[in-house]
Image (tube, rainbow, N blue to C red):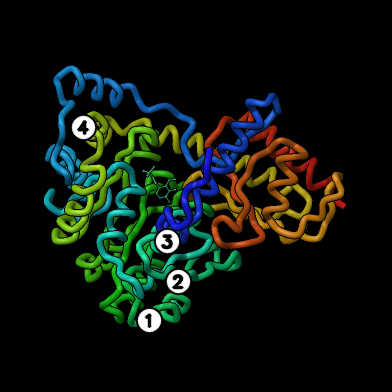
């Protein structure tokens, strides 16, 4: 097929990268299809199925004929269920008119940033970051300001770093915890310390991505910034969704609570793109939020056991140092001890991308290299897969690192 004419694609498209986590998952899929024995630890989705009561609610919605266009902001039943969720679980008061629903948590972030950013605006993204934040900011024509959260600080942004990164042009701080890719969380006290900095800078809004809220382990208590510091409530967008907690990644429903004029702005934008999240998925999400929640702690326990297994086995691998995160289903081990070593194939491991490539080639384990998340030399493992596969993958990683010279 002929290439597209020169200048046909938009300049804004040229500013962004395709999602590298999706690329790794795709590569693993292709190798598997070609007959290779590959364990994919790249994908960020729970291996559990959507609970039956949620599926049944969707089937019932189809049978009732809930198959037509809905309000752009979301069906009133879901906006009410989301408002109740924020009150019940987070102590946050949002009226249903302050709730906005979109086709996934990603679409909430996309709408919020696209509706508010102008060229010259700055958005603080904490590295290692979820891959989409800087790219969406760049697509909007604004500038992602990357602040590196250090391994030594548990991959958390410090108040001093935040203060130093803010300029008169800063429009948003994007916070994400439990974090993808590190699993790091912030205690209420740590959030309060960040909030104290933000109180000094009234031009900065906060987009908090709480999508892994329900996946926190041990006695760690999840907190969200607008509840910790009510003086920030007016300028905080609290984002969440059903994808991770309810194992509903494919249903595409995310939501947020924020100032009503911002809901209206996002609705204006969404009315000229996808219109609204799928009617059936919205009804399924009403059931997810209002229905039984008792499977959440059971799944959480399974994730916690997997975290402990992976952290323990990776720390037994030569040259790998793996912190034990409080949440999400990721670990982000350091490979500082392996840089400069040579793989049996003769390849020298100069970067974390080399490491991930050589590991996939040598042992058939697909992980995502740290550079994709803006902090090297690390890699990310998603442990949302069975214990037996995780054990096998970690054994292969141990064998691979032991074989490096
Ligand atoms: C930190 C973070 N935010 C948002 C999302 C997007 O979620 P959704 O599938 O609901 O768009 C993900 C999904 O991987 C994520 O890891």
Q: Is residue 405 visible?
A: yes
Q: Quadrant of residue 254?
A: top left
Q: Which mark is residue 145?
A: 2
Reading the image, the residue beneath label 4 is 279
Query: Label 4 vs label 3: CA separation?
Result: 34 Å
Q: Secondary structure at mark 1?
A: loop
Query: Label 2 vs label 1: CA separation?
Result: 10 Å
- Residue at figure coordinates x 68%, y 38% from the top left: 365
Given residues 264 and 198, the one toward you in this image is 264
Q: Earlier in the sequence, mark 4 or mark 1?
A: 1
Q: Residues within 10 Å of mark 1 (few under 14, many from 20)?
A: some
Q: Earlier in the sequence, mark 3 or mark 2?
A: 3
Q: Quadrant of residue 143?
A: bottom left
Query: Label 2 vs label 4: CA separation?
Result: 37 Å
**What is the x, y in percent for residue 90?**
27, 52
Foreground mark, 3 or 1, reads 3
Q: Earlier in the sequence, mark 4 or mark 3?
A: 3
Q: Which mark is residue 11?
A: 3
- Residue at figure coordinates x 71%, y 35% from the top left: 364
Given residues 232 and 109, the one toward you in this image is 109
Q: Is residue 101 left or right of residue 353?
A: left
Q: Secondary structure at mark 3?
A: helix
Q: Residues within 10 Å of mark 2 (few under 14, many from 20)?
A: some
Q: Residue furthest top?
A: 63
Reading the image, the residue beneath label 1 is 167
How many discs mark residues in the rendered view?
4
Q: Earlier in the sequence, mark 3 or mark 1?
A: 3
Q: Is residue 176 visible?
A: no
- Residue at figure coordinates x 50%, y 49% from the top left: 19
Circles 4 and 1: CB atoms closer than 8 Å:
no
């Amino acid at each position: 097929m002929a290439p597209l004419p020169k200048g046909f694609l938009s300049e804004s498209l040229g500013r962004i990268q395709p999602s590298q986590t999706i690329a790794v998952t795709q590569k693993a899929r292709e190798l598997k299809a070609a007959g290779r024995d590959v364990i994919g630890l790249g994908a960020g989705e729970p291996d559990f199925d959507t609970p039956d009561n949620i599926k049944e609610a969707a089937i019932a919605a189809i049978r009732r004929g809930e198959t037509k266009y809905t309000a752009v902001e979301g069906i009133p039943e879901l906006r009410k269920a989301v408002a109740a969720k924020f009150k019940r679980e987070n102590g946050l008061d949002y009226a249903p008119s302050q709730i906005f629903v979109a086709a996934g948590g990603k679409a909430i972030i996309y709408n919020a940033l696209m509706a508010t950013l102008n060229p010259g605006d700055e958005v603080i993204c904490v590295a290692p970051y979820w891959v989409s934040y800087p790219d969406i900011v760049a697509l909007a024509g604004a500038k992602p300001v990357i602040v590196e959260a250090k391994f030594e600080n548990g991959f958390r942004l410090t108040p001093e770093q935040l203060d130093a990164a803010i300029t008169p042009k800063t429009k948003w701080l994007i916070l994400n915890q439990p974090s993808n890719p590190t699993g790091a969380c912030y205690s209420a006290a740590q959030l309060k310390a960040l909030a104290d900095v933000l109180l000094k800078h009234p031009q900065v809004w906060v987009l908090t991505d709480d999508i892994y809220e329900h996946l926190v382990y041990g006695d760690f208590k999840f907190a969200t910034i607008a509840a910790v510091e009510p003086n920030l409530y007016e300028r905080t967008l609290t984002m969440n969704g059903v994808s991770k907690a309810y194992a509903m990644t494919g249903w595409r429903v995310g939501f947020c609570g924020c100032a009503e004029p911002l809901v209206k702005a996002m609705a204006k934008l969404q009315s000229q793109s996808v219109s609204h999240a799928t009617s059936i998925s919205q009804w399924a999400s009403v059931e997810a939020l209002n229905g039984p929640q008792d499977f959440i702690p059971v799944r959480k326990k399974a994730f916690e056991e997997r975290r402990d297994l992976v952290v323990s086995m990776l720390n037994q691998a030569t040259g790998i140092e793996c912190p034990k995160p409080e949440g999400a289903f990721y670990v982000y081990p350091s490979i500082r001890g392996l840089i400069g070593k040579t793989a049996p194939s003769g390849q020298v491991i100069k970067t974390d991308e080399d490491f991930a490539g050589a590991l996939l080639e040598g042992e058939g384990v697909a992980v995502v290299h740290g550079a994709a998340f803006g902090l090297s030399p690390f890699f990310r493992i998603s442990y949302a897969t069975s214990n037996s596969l995780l054990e096998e993958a970690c054994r292969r990683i141990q064998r691979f690192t032991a074989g490096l010279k």
